[in-house]
Amino acid sequence: MDEDRSPTKLEYYDDMFKLQSTATLLSSFLVRGGQPSDKGYISNPQFKFIVEDVRSKDKIVYHYGHFENSLDVSIEKGAQVSLSVDEDRRRLNSRLHSAGHLLDICVRNVGWVHLEPTKGHHFPDGPFVEYKGVVPQNELQSKQKELELEASSLISKGGKVSVSILPYDKASELCGGSLPDYIPKDSTPRIVQLGENPGCPCGGTHVSDINEILSLKVSQIRTRKGLTKVFYSVVG
């Protein structure tokens, strides 16, 4: 594989619902495995490649999937191709991703201010947000209902979801005065902000208004070994 490549341009940074584009094929290779992501297809007059997963490594985006109606397709480097994103899947991913950030806001609003987000899984196969910190077992049931009520209130009020690439200091200010340690201080992080709430660094796709999340249901909360995991879903 050719290692001398320019970073892939992420067009959704400028328009999160641009679903059609064109590109130049650089290489293809056989691989197995994957995790749910945006889906769609890559095509030209010679082939149609069904995209089942998308991964990023060293600023290069790799598309994984299979060729439609063919087991042996010969494609050449430099071929011009069309890119199409599955709109329904993109919208679902954007709702789930935005709902995960909304959940962070709700967690603070119901009084769990000591919980610190550590990671989130915002795809359809069991979305959750994990937090550093624990909560009393006797609070779980009541707080689960509070989280859903708070989410419902915020969704009904709505609010613009903005995404900006900012200098580190400005990004830190927008995120409540600090950024995670993994973000270099000389970088320009991409920050998502839901309404007037503090922002957070994120490279994914999102809805344009909080009310487009439609709903957020908390299905389970688990707290153990110093961590609290909140599972959620979106309906509608």
Image (cartoon, rainbow, N blue to C red):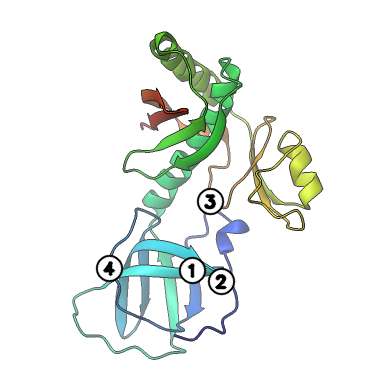
Q: Note whether 152 is above or below 68 in the view shown.
A: above
Q: Are marks 3 and 1 in contact (CB under 8 Å)?
A: no
Quarter of the view holding residue 136:
top left
Mark in the foreground, 4 or 3:
4
Image quarter (top left, top right, bottom left or bottom right) of the C terminus: top left
Q: Which residue is mark 4?
A: 32
- Residue 85 circle label: none
Distance from the alpha carbon under mark 2 to that under mark 3: 15 Å
Q: Is residue 41 left or right of residue 97?
A: left
Amino acid identity at mark 2: Thr
Distance from the alpha carbon under mark 4 to that under mark 3: 24 Å
Q: Note whether 168 is above or below 224 in the view shown.
A: below
Q: Which residue is mark 1?
A: 61
Amino acid identity at mark 1: Val
Distance from the alpha carbon under mark 3 to that under mark 1: 13 Å
Q: Which residue is mark 2?
A: 8
Marks 2 and 3, the one that precedes in the sequence: 2
Q: Is residue 167 left or right of residue 39?
A: right
Distance from the alpha carbon under mark 4 to that under mark 2: 22 Å
Q: Are marks 1 and 4 in contact (CB under 8 Å)?
A: no
Q: x%, y% of residue 225?
A: 42, 28
> Is disc 2 surrounded by few (<14), some (14 to 19) or many (20+) residues within 10 Å?
few
Q: Is residue 97 left or right of residue 6?
A: left
Q: Residue at x 26, y 85 (%)?
A: 73
Q: Residue at x 53, y 45 (%)?
A: 206
> Is disc 1 surrounded by few (<14), some (14 to 19) or many (20+) residues within 10 Å?
some
Q: Which residue is mark 3?
A: 204
